Amino acid sequence: METFLFNDRADAAEQLLKLIPPVNPTQTIVLGIPRGGVPIAAQIAKSLKVPLDVLLVRKLASPDNPEYALGAVSLDRIFIEEAYTGRKSDLDRWVEAARRELQNRKKLYRLGTSNPELRSKTVILVDDGIATGRTLLLAIQLVRAQHPRAIWVAVPVSSPEAAKRIRSQVDRFICLHEPEPFYGVGRFYRTFDSVDDETVIRILV
């Protein structure tokens, strides 16, 4: 029998907001992980009355098994699990394809604007859930390199294993549920529609 924790992303955001403490609006920014994390991040940013932006990072997976994350990639960094034993040529090809997609998203989302200033700010990273944690681990590295005041991660649901990995890397880990067994993020939402680029652009403008 299916166990739904949330009706949809809007419901997840409303529940998650109950756990997020008050923040200083002038020293805080919310960053959504594209694309599924952006609608939740937008709702949280609006409620907290703080700026919203996106962090250009994405899961890295082989075309043969797109659900399994080998790691994560940004425009200038790569996070690969040590357990990966495949061919380097395959990995290089997948990384190149992922970065082409991220470059395209940068053009669509940024519209020529610069990256947000994160130095000395509390940065709240938001996604719609965490399965392996690889994407968020890279996101945390990217944010930390910009010397924020603090890094928070806020997610509705996470696998216990990923939660343990992420919790040790941030100043505050906010998560509603860590179910075991973990069947994949989408299994815990009654409605888990795909979020397209047009939706992200509409949220950001």
Image (tube, rainbow, N blue to C red):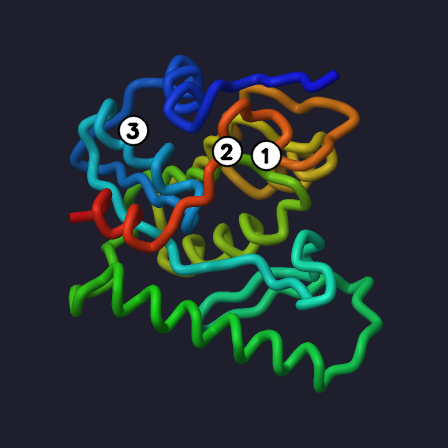
Kind of residue sitting beneath label 3: Gln
Q: Mark 3 or mark 2, which is nearer to you?
A: 2
User: Is 169 placed above or below 75 here?
Assistant: above
Query: Which quarter of the rendered picture does the N terminus lie within?
Result: top right
Residue under label 2, please give it. Answer: 192
Q: Residue at x 34, y 71 (%)?
A: 104
Disc nearer the start of the sequence (3/2): 3
Q: What's the distance in space between the residues labelled 3 and 2, CA to CA?
A: 16 Å
Q: Do the residues labelled 2 and 1 touch (CB within 8 Å)?
A: yes
Q: What residue type is labelled 2?
A: Phe
Please state which of residues 187 and 167 is positioned toward the viewer in this rendering. Answer: 187
Q: Distance between the residues labelled 2 and 1?
A: 6 Å
- What residue is drawn where x is 54% and y is 23%? 190
Q: Which of marks 3 and 1 is in front?
A: 1
Can I make out residue 136 in this image? yes
In the rendered image of this protein, does residue 120 appear above or below residue 49? below
Could you tell me residue 45's position as x and y percent? 26, 32
Tell me the distance, in whole angstroms, between the alpha carbons under discs 3 and 1.
19 Å
Mark 3 is surrounded, within 10 Å at the Cα level, by few (under 14), some (14 to 19) or many (20 or more) other residues, namely: many
Which residue is drawn at the image coordinates 45% and 25% (left, top)?
8
Q: Name the residue under label 3.
A: 43
Q: Residue 186, percent across and down? A: 59, 34
**Residue of label 1:** 186
